[in-house]
Amino acid sequence: MKSYRKELWFRTKRRREFLNITPQVQECLRESGISDGFVLCNAMHITASVFINDDESGLHQDFEAWLEKLAPEKPYSQYRHNTAENNADAHLKRSIMGREVVVAITDGRLDFGPWEQIFYGEFDGTRDKRVLVKIIGE
Ligand code: ZN
């Protein structure tokens, strides 16, 4: 069995952004030389997510609007967590959108369903943050 590990670094310009990281994960898979197994991809921070969905027009704005309804960023005073920092909403948004994804690898490819893409969801950005890519298989 082979094992591969890599950290992908991101620094978004805005507090909240969604990035399609499928090309980077595919590059990791190519580097690993693994053709059959699993890839785990997880945010290494508790205010960011990795999730799978479609890269469809309007969908990211819909996620943004939906998450703002569930856990609005402001007013900051509505959250008990917001004393030393103002990112309670980001912790909550990350919990909803999830920490990680696992994708099967078959014949050297990410074995996606139709339209599936891997996204990094940033909810408290403008600083360096990481995603772990771990691949095991043969
Ligand atoms: Zn916090």
Image (spheres, rainbow, N blue to C red):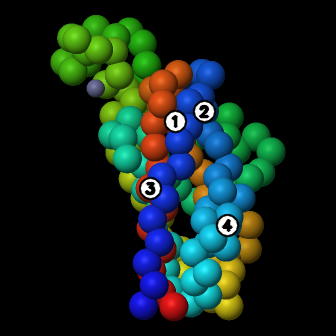
Seen from the viewer's position, the closer of residues 110 and 91 is 110
Measure how far apart labels 2 and 3 are at the Cα level: 18 Å
Q: SS for tag 3?
A: strand
Query: Residue 19: percent from the left, percent from the top?
Result: 65, 43
Instruction: Work out whether mark 2 precedes mark 3 in sequence or the reverse, and give the earlier one.
Output: 2
Q: CA distance from mark 4 to mark 2?
A: 21 Å
Q: Secondary structure at mark 2?
A: strand
Instruction: Say left or right for 74 vs 85.
Output: right
Mark 3: few/some/many CA within 10 Å (<14, 14-19, 20+): some
4 or 2: mark nearer the eye = 4
Amino acid found under the numbered disc labelled 3:
Leu
Does residue 104 sit above or below 57 in this rendering?
below
Q: Is residue 7 left or right of residue 36?
A: left
Foreground tag (2 vs 3): 3
Q: Amino acid at mark 1?
A: Glu
Q: Which residue is mark 2?
A: 17
Q: Earlier in the sequence, mark 4 or mark 2?
A: 2
Q: Check whether the beta carbons of the residues at disc 1 and disc 2 lie within 8 A of each other.
A: yes
CA distance for labels 4 and 3 = 13 Å
Percent position of residue 124, x then y = 45, 26
Give the crowd class for mark 4: few <14, some 14-19, many >=20 residues within 10 Å: some
- Could you say whether the residue bearing mark 4 is in a helix, strand or loop? helix
| CA separation in Å, label 1 and label 4 | 20 Å
Q: Which mark is on residue 122?
A: 1
Query: How many angstroms separate mark 3 from mark 1 (CA)?
Result: 14 Å
- The residue at which mark 4 appears reads as 26
Secondary structure at badge 1 equals strand
Of callouts 4 and 3, the N-terminal one: 4
